[in-house]
Every structure is written in structure tokens, then in C-alpha cells.
Image (spheres, grey):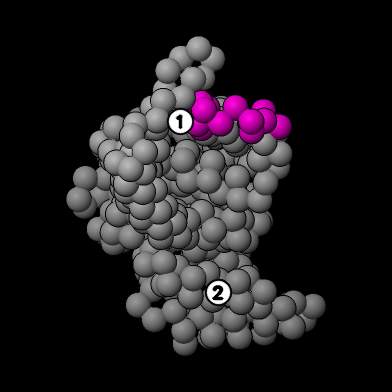
Amino acid sequence: MREYLLPKEGFRVLFVIGKGGVGKTTTSASIAVGLAERGYKTMIVSLDPAHNLGDVLMEKLNDKPKKIMDNLYASELDMEKLIKAYLKHLEKNLKNMYRYLTVINLEKYFEVLSYSPGIEEYATLEAIREILVKGEDWDVIVFDTPPTGLTLRVLALPKISLIWADKLIDIRRKILQRRRVIAKINGEQEYDIDGEKFKLPKEEAEDPVMKELIQYKEEVEFVENVITNPSKSSVVAVMNPEMLPLYETRRAYESLKKFNVPLRLLVVNKVIQLKEDIPELRVKLEAQRKVLEEIGNEFHGIDVITLPMFAEEPRGVEWLKRLGGMILEGERGS
Ligand SMILES: Nc1ncnc2c1ncn2[C@@H]1O[C@H](COP(=O)(O)OP(=O)(O)O)[C@@H](O)[C@H]1O
Ligand SMILES: [Mg+2]
């Protein structure tokens, strides 16, 4: 058994990443079905806006976990709904904290923000966080992710956000300090907003902005601690035995290293295996052989497994059990 796919400290989180079409959903569903079959309470969640988890499991899915078999639940998140909910949450917070800034037209601002770059990444991270907060309900949580670029940006986000949060907390601390100095010189200022008396907060403990910043930092730290903990999280990269997926996997490997997110398994899917020689496929097979050789030479410390190209599309629980067995217990390939 590949024990880095099994729960160790509490629950295990698996991120299955890779280019579009390489077999991420097939691989993640196979791992999930295989784990459920072995008695682990498993949830599989598709974060890919172009969902196909339902197609692979041959079940109709939505954003609520649906029971697929004993120990296995599956859902497909609704990214548009999540982005809307994320923006609503931001809007509520901002309106609450900056009641006195009536000059800013927040409605207009949020309309634009929903198209802003980065919003999808933040909403995805927030969705992951909400699932991880309830992680103890499960033995294993498998994330079937969007194509590599977006996923890597999401996994990098906690580290970047923590740097930002620290900086903002620092600035806020200075603002509060200056307010205290000004209050000492000028006396306490009172403002009138819509007939309500309002004083600017001066102490950290009474400042809603500071409270929000500290809460945000704690939330991000929680996610960061889970995704960089090798006894909790593992990344499974899926690729096909071709040059371009190899280049992409190489880049993903480097990025994940930088962000301390542990890549543990490389699944080389759709490997062509012929019983007899087919001249038309010789060039293709030679290219495949080269890629497999390259893989053997790099990705040190990472487990590699190859899965054959099947004559039919592996769909439905029976197929996935078979593939799950190959991934969970199969020998090291290449
Ligand atoms: N080993 C395999 N042999 C044959 N077909 C496969 C194999 N793995 C995946 N497929 C098929 O390839 C297509 C893409 O797989 P999928 O898991 O949906 O990829 P992704 O989620 O990365 O886009 C699907 O039609 C799937 O059934
Ligand atoms: Mg998919």
C-alpha cells in the first residue's frame, strides 16, 4: 500500500493535479473508490469548473456530497456560486468596517471585482478551507483540481497571503498608534454618520479592521499548515507519456517545492502497451520510451506509477475499483 495516500495524523488530503485531459478525474476517482473499498471514509470533491467527475463516476453530482458507495461521497463545487458568495462576504465586511467612508461607491467596486484576476483563485482557496475546517469528518479528502496553472496559483496563495497579511497588520498597527497620538494632542474626535455618533477606534482590541486582519491571517495559516504538512497532504501529479506534459510536470514539481507542498506520486497515464509490433506506432512508441526514460532520471524521491492506455474509457465504480487497486498497491513503474 502507498501509505502517503492513507490517513496518518487525523485526515489525509490529496490534490490530484495535471494538464487538461491527462486523466486527473479518472485518477482521483480511482484513488477515492480504492480507498473507500478499503474502509477509509472518503470524500472526493471536484474543484474544476469544467467538471467531469460525475461522468467518470456515472452519477449526477452537485455541490452537496452524494453517497456513491459505502464510505464514498462525491461533489462538484459550483465555482460561480462560490465566487458570488466570496464577494458577498467581502462586501459585508467592508461595509461594516468602513461605514464612515460613504464617499466610496462600493456597489460599483464589487461589480468590477467579480471580473478581477485572482478572484477565482481566492474563491477556490476559500472553498478548500471550508472543506478542510471540517476535515475531521473524513479519513481522506481527494481534490480533483482544475488544470495545473490555476491549481498551482491556489496552492501558492496561502504563502503569499500571509506575507500580505503581516504587512497589513503592521500598517494598521501604525495607523492606530498615530490615532492615539493625535487624540492626545487634539482630544477625542467624534463623527456623525447618518445621525449616529462614531469614534475612530484607537486600540487594537476594539478595532474591527485589526480583528478582521488577524482572523484572516489565522484562517490562511490553518490552510497553509495543512497543505505543507507531509503527514497530512500529498499531491498526485498525472501526466501522459508525451513531451509537453513532461515539461509541465517538471515546472509543477519546481513550483510545489518552492511552496513546500509535498508532491509524492507521479501517475503516468495512458501508456501504450502493444502485444505485437505495429509499424505505424513505432515513432509514437519511441517518443513514449524517451519520456519514460527521462522520468526515471528526474523526480527524485517521488514515486512513479504507469497506467496503460485501455481500449475503452474507464468509467463507473467497477472500472475505478480495478484502477484504484493498481494505483494504491501497484508496483513502482519506470
Ligand atoms: N488509462 C486510460 N485509458 C483510456 N482512456 C483513459 C484513460 N485514462 C483516462 N481516459 C479517458 O481520457 C479522457 C480524459 O480523462 P479525464 O480523467 O477526464 O482527464 P482530466 O480530468 O485530466 O481532464 C476521458 O475520456 C477518460 O475516460
Ligand atoms: Mg477532469
* Residue topped by disc 2: 251
Say if mark 2 contacts mark 1, CB within 8 Å: no
Q: What's the distance in space between the residues labelled 2 and 1, CA to CA?
A: 41 Å
Viewer-closest of 186 and 307: 186
Q: Position of residue 51 (x, y in %)?
A: 62, 40
Task: Please identify the quarter of the rendering in which residue 244 is found.
Answer: bottom right
The N terminus sits in image quarter? bottom left
Give the image quarter of residue 289: bottom right
Q: Amino acid at mark 2?
A: Arg
Q: Of label 2 and label 1, which has the lower sequence position? A: 1
- The answer to whether residue 322 is visible is no
Q: From the viewer's perspective, is residue 34 above or below residue 74?
A: below
Residue at 60% in and 45% down: 119
Range of the magenta residues? Answer: 93-108
Q: Is residue 107 within the magenta segment?
A: yes
Tell me which amino acid carries mark 1: Met
Mark 1 neighbour class, 10 Å CA radius: few under 14, some 14 to 19, many 20 or more: some
x 73%, y 82%: residue: 282
Identify which residue, 83 or 12, lies in the foreground. Answer: 83
